[in-house]
Image (cartoon, rainbow, N blue to C red):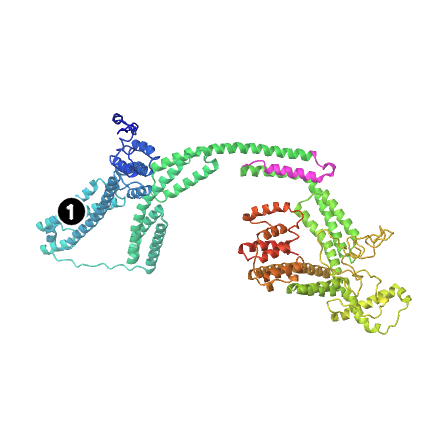
Amino acid sequence: MFPFSTQSKAAPSPDALAVNAKTPEAHPLDALTHGAFSAQTSGERMACIREWLATSPGSEQMQQVFKELSGKDKGAAKLLREKLDEIKRSKTQATIALEWADKAQALLALTKLNLADALAWQRDAAKAGAPLSKEPLAGLKAQLVERVRAIEDLQHRVQVQREAAVLLAQRIEVLSTKPWTDAQAAQDALAADVAHWQTEADALLADSNWNSVDLRFVPQLHDAQAQLQLVWQAFQDALALTIAAAQDVTAPLPKVPVWADELRLARGVPLEPVVTPAKPKVDPEIRAKATAYVAEVLAKLEHEMAQGHGKASAGAANALRQALKDNGRLIDDKLEAQAHAALVAAGELEGWQRWRADQLRDELVLKAEALLKRPDGQAIGGRKMQDQLRGLREQWKLTDQGGVPNHALWKRFDEACNEAHKVVEAWLEKMKAESAEHRAQRLALIEEVKAWAEANRVALDDDWKGFSRVLHQFGDRWREAGHIGEKMFAELQPLWKAAIDHAAEPLETLQKRSLELRHVMIDEARVLGAEAMLRIDAVKALQQRWQAEAHRVPIDRRHEQKLWDAFRKPIDDAFNRKTAEREKAQSALSERDRIVLDASKALQAANASGDAQAIRSAMSALEAALSGQRQAQAAVVAAGPAESNVTMVSPDAAAAPAAATEASEAAAGETASDAIAEVAPEPVKPVAPPKRVVAMRGDDRPGMRKEEPAAMGRGGKFGDRKDAGRPGSRDGGRDGGRDVRGPGRMDERGGPRGERSERPAYGERSDAPRLGDAAFRAQRDALEQAQFALRKLAAQAHGEALTHLLTAWETRDAALVPSVQELGSQVSPAARGGWVKVLSQPASGDAATALLRLEMAAEVPTPAEQLSARRMYQLQLLTKRNDPTPTQTWAQDAATVLASAFDVSQVRRLQNVLKVLLKP
């Protein structure tokens, strides 16, 4: 045994520890992203990305890192994507901000800033999404707001200065009513105030925003300044003259009444009595005329202002000012105040209209310049361009009515319209060339019509329809000859009418003769229709003449239709009269028609009741009435007492003359009509007394015997013969389908081949006369509705029976199983008994195979989950060829299903199967 070494040979030697394992290469972007690509967890990677994003890296570097990191870590890549989206939004906002900054700077650079444009800049910039809270838009917005505020403040100061000038003028006027010494004492203060006011006014005029002030404020300041200077200068001159007159007695007195009186008293000159001139009385009529005139001018001004008409309101305002000058002393104070208020409002409206008119002109200029700047494929045509130019010029005219004209904008607008009008000129030249071409085509067509008219004065081969067709073709060519102007059309239309009328002259002459002939035939038709006896041959001959004339000579369709209606009316009236007479003669119903109508009404009532037994009874009664059995029964009932006295009829009675036989039948019919109300609807066999040959025909065919009504049969299937089941028929009956024809080769109709039988047609199996129209339609409709009602009732009964059967299966109650009559002819009593038996016992067995067999027998589809089982069972049936088929054993299979436990999933399958198998 060798001692084990303390160091295993498989263990690595210490020298192997010195060999370092191969380290993975670092990602190129790892150092850039602070170790995001070498991080072990997603949280560490996101922390590295946040730290790197805090250093504000470039967008290109972020794009590169996002591309590399999106496939490795979605969370870290999301931080980069959000940062990139923020940069993109900031770039977009920067572009928008730059655009609106340019617009703001352009507004600020204007020497005359429009307040509406400055206010609209902020609103439109906010709508466009510009960052108004960031620079440079924030600063520009503040500058615009400051300038707008400065302009509004300047306008307010103008109003204040105007009011200050008015107050200074009032102070000066008040001093003129006081002693001149008081005025001399207040002169220095007034001079300082006037100088201060003038300084303020000069400051307003020197303000940099003065050009942006609304135009209505500028004249107010100038008028106030001029008025104040005038009043102040007059006050200084009057005061200086007063001071000179006080110092020098010989100096002239001032024109101020108070100061002049004061100087006179100082000089010792007595004052002259003040005589107040009495106001002259004004005629009331003149005052009323002046008031009405001013009120009319005022109403006109208010109307123009309400409509917004700038120029018209300005003219109305001038007219009102002139009216106030001429009639101001004749009107009352209230009307004068209204007039002055309207003049003030008119001045404000004029300023607003001037500003609004320039905006409208700018829009029209842009529209005019955009007419030619259309995208490719959307150029405007000549006609549409002409209409748009006309509309733009009309709008410009309307705009000029609302404000002062702007010649600069008009020049741009006119140049744009003239440039766009070149398209209209080219279109007009094209239309002119086409119009000349169309004119030449129409002239050529007129000449062609003239030549054709000279060469075809008579229709070839008497083909007047072809002649008319050629004329219509000429007319179509004229209508399709192209567009020409109204003036040219008015020139060519008379030439065309003359040519076409000359060409159509032979046809029109022939049509006149044809109309005369047709009117003659209409008169003949009236004469024929008025005759007591309608002659059919004459009517046919007249109609043939009419048709020949209509085929030979064509006339206008509507005129021809009117003539045909006039020709046909008397003949139709005659036929209608004949039909009415025939119907009137037939309206007196025969006894048989009356019986059939009564039986039809009874059948209709039975159809409405919904009782199958009543419908069948009523159908039997109607069949009996149709075959004439009710008449025979009534005759037998009526002749019953008389026959009891008859002992024997001699053989010679059978050979009675035909006239006696007909008389006897007529008598029987009359007797039957009297006793018809006492006869029951069901056919009744007559009593046994000896049969009178005189009143009966020797016809013993089935259904022809008067005492035995024909049995009502059910309709057969398609292909069954109507005479199936009758003796002698090929389809069976009592003879079992053998040929009962004798050696004489008698056919089915009872006579030798080639001869027609005495037997009436189907549905007319009596010797009674033919039914009238009313009786025939009534019995036909009643029978059709009865058959439909029976089918409907049978379907309802079938559904009810099936429902009861399924209920019996669910409740395991054999008493609920329908009867054999309710189940139908397809279920035998033995089958029903088997169903009752299995339902009386507890549920047992499996119904899966039985349901498959039932679905095969009924040929109904199997649910999808059972298709494989059905295919497997069909393969099994192929190996059992001697076993009965599912069609033969469906009743037993149904019993098997009913014997099993009730399953909701199998109810629908059994119901679908029994719907088919129980159907009669």
Residue 408 position within the rendered picture, expressed as x and y whole percent measured from the top left: 34, 36
- In this rendered view, identify the residue nearer to me: 443 or 678: 678
Q: Quadrant of the image for the C terminus? A: bottom right
Which residue was labeled with disc 1? 194
Judge whether residue 913 can be spotted in this image.
yes
Question: What's under tag 1, amino acid-wise?
Answer: Val
- Is 637 on the left-hand or right-hand side of 139? right
Label 1 Cα crowd, 10 Å radius (few <14 / some 14-19 / many 20+): many
- Is 79 on the left-hand or right-hand side of 245? right
Query: In this picture, which residue range is highlighted in magenta?
Result: 455-484
Residue 40 position within the rendered picture, expressed as x and y whole percent measured from the top left: 29, 36
Residue 124 position within the rendered picture, expressed as x and y whole percent measured from the top left: 32, 42
- In this rendered view, identify the residue nearer to me: 355 or 917: 917
Q: Is residue 49 magenta?
A: no
In this rendering, the answer to whether 49 lies above or below 626 is above
- In this rendered view, identify the residue nearer to me: 132 or 545: 132
* Image point (58%, 32%), residue name: 440
Q: Is residue 473 magenta?
A: yes
Judge whether residue 106 can be spotted in this image.
no
Choose top left, top right, bottom left or bottom right for residue 57. top left
Choose top left, top right, bottom left or bottom right for residue 474. top right
Residue 435 position within the rendered picture, expressed as x and y whole percent measured from the top left: 54, 34
